[in-house]
Amino acid sequence: MRSLLVALSGLLALAADAPPKLLPEVRQRLDADMDRLLAFYKDLHAHPELSLQEERTAAQLAKELREAGLDVTTKVGGHGIVGLLRNGPGPTVMIRADMDALPIVEQTGLPYASKVRTRDRFGNEVGVMHACGHDMNLACLVGTARVLASLKDRWQGTLMCVGQPAEEVGAGARQMLADGLFRRFPKPDFGLALHCDSSFAYGQVRYREGQMQANVDSVTIVVRGKGGHGAAPHITIDPIVLAARIILDLQTIVSRETNPVDPVVVTVGSIHGGTKHNIIPNECRLQVTVRTTTDATRKHTLEAIERIAKAAAVGARAPEPIIEVDPSEFTPALFNDPGLTRRLVPVLQRVLGADNVRERPLSMGGEDFSLYGREGVPTFYYFLGTQEPGRVAAAERSAEVTLPGLHSNAFYPVPAPTLRTGVTSMTMLVLELMGKP
Ligand SMILES: [Zn+2]
Ligand SMILES: [Zn+2]
């Protein structure tokens, strides 16, 4: 009797671990689309556009979604795209992918590498590169839409595909919501997104239940001085030296003012001042990214930056610095809805194999997908592996080998297997939420 029970529970466990029954069909549909999706991906990769300039990307996405049979609306909150596939009564499931690239000169050496140069919004000439993998996120969105469109008899509800602009500057989700994303279109019952990750192998995904990423604030500090001749510093107030002092003083916010168990990051990512060796300029401009996980540490860190910059200026006899915290670039922390996470993770495990689905620690990255969750939509966001497994293993073995991170000029996903995992996993998640029993 006992052995019968053991055998029975073994069988049940096997059934729970078995791949979902639609998986072979999903794979088959995807195989038929792979060439087209890879061409779409490589075209996007070769033609990246900066945040708020995603005109061509939006047009290409709109075209693909229309051809997949979706009802597409363009120019939602800037270059945003909304594609709807209405398929009877049932839940509305939103899948969102981001569209913008970064001001980086690509150095991957890929045959489809970007050679694009453009002007950023400050008028500087910059290279442009999909160094965060948003081109892959978009290809996964299109692939998922195509597979689901070809399997319409297997699910019911409304699929809502969103191409979101300006993720890198934290503006796109806010703009789309302000332009009626959840008023002009059905408010989703669930929101899903995936994003490339540079640190683990294709075929795998990573998630976290609850808080997954940090609050993000962007602070600009204009350090003011009094310009003059570089050979006569005594009759000037040098804003370059003062900026250097401020940058070092800011390091004490994390090391001396914050409880060590509360994660905080203060990074000065840009410093610009002066034009020539022998001229002391009037001002020097710093751009700072601030990452926190709670409202309290956020408030304290922003206050400390202001206090430290102003105090350093007093010490240098300089005018008070101008400090701007751009509210339009604030992105709240990203949360994965616990109930939804517990429903979807077993699906990922059955599709990809339990070993390929791992929980990851909290990251201090930011992601404006969080804003959809703040509107009351239960959301689930996960990371997609992109790297050759051998390369990841080599990096784990030796400190000499490093994998280029996201936003690096050398980052790129291995296209076909990354795309395959992204489309298969996302499609199966949607089918879990909208599939017919
Ligand atoms: Zn990014
Ligand atoms: Zn990104």
Image: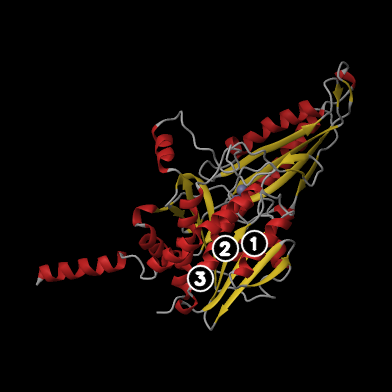
Image quarter hosting the N terminus: bottom left
- Kindly indicate the quadrant of the structure image that contains residue 181: bottom right
Q: Secondary structure at mark 3?
A: helix
According to the image, label 2 marks what residue? 142
Whether label 3 touches label 2, CB < 8 Å: no
Residue 23 against residue 396 in the figure, above or below: below
Of all residues, the one furthest to the top in this rendering is 231
* Residue 348 image position (x, y, % from top left): 41, 61
**Extreme residue toward the bottom, this view:** 89
Q: Which amino acid is tagged 2?
A: Val
* Circle 3 residue: 148
| Image point (85%, 26%), residue name | 237
Q: Are marks 1 and 2 in contact (CB under 8 Å)?
A: yes
Residue 109 placed where, x, y %?
58, 37
In the rendered image, is residue 188 in sight?
A: yes
The answer to whether residue 280 is left or right of residue 303 is right
Rounded to the nearest angstrom, the CA distance separating label 3 from label 2 is: 10 Å
Dot 1 beta carbon under 8 Å from ligand 2: no
* Mark 3 beta carbon near ligand 2 (under 8 Å): no
Q: Amino acid at mark 3?
A: Leu
Q: Are marks 3 and 1 in contact (CB under 8 Å)?
A: no
* 3 or 2: tag closer to the N-terminus: 2
Q: CA distance from mark 3 to mark 1?
A: 16 Å
Is residue 215 something that shows in the picture?
A: no
Q: Residues within 10 Å of mark 2 (few under 14, many from 20)?
A: many
Q: Secondary structure at mark 1?
A: helix
- Quadrant in which the C terminus is drawn: bottom left
Q: Nearer the viewer, residue 175 or 245?
A: 175
